[in-house]
Image (spheres, rainbow, N blue to C red):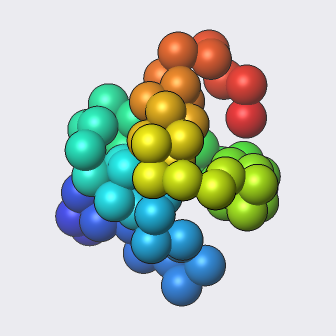
Amino acid sequence: MDNNKIYSPEMPMGLDFALANNQAARDYFNGLSEEAQKRVIEHTHLIQSKDEMQAFADSLIKTGGLF
């Protein structure tokens, strides 16, 4: 499996782009359980800008498993 691509039809395009810009955050996301990935995706519905989405993606590796 290609660890650089997320295979999920629910993946918001903005999150996919943001994770593409941060390999560590992408690796973290890919390592989450399906349920945790769904919680991350659900949170993205509150995000309203590209910069905010990137900050959220970057924060995934800084939160120590918030999700």
Q: In this view, does 31 lie above or below 12?
A: above
Residue drawn 62% across and 17% down?
63
Q: In which quarter of the image is residue 48?
A: bottom right
User: Does residue 50 appear left or right of residue 20 in this picture?
Assistant: right
- The quadrant in which the C terminus is found is top right
Residue 57 in view here: no
User: Does residue 10 appear left or right of residue 67 in this picture?
Assistant: left
Q: In this view, does 35 lie above or below 60?
A: below
Q: Position of residue 46 (x, y in %)?
A: 76, 54
- The quadrant in which the N terminus is found is bottom left
Residue 21 in view here: yes
Q: Where is residue 38 in the image (x, y as percent from the top left)?
A: 72, 60
Q: Quadrant of residue 35?
A: bottom right
Q: Where is residue 65 in the image (x, y as percent from the top left)?
A: 66, 23
User: Does residue 46 appear left or right of residue 3 in this picture?
Assistant: right
Residue drawn 54% across and 53% down?
49
Q: Position of residue 51 (x, y in %)?
A: 45, 42
Q: Is residue 13 above or below residue 31?
A: below
Residues 31 and 52: in front is 52
Residue drawn 67% across and 52% down?
47
| Numbered circles on residues, count | 0
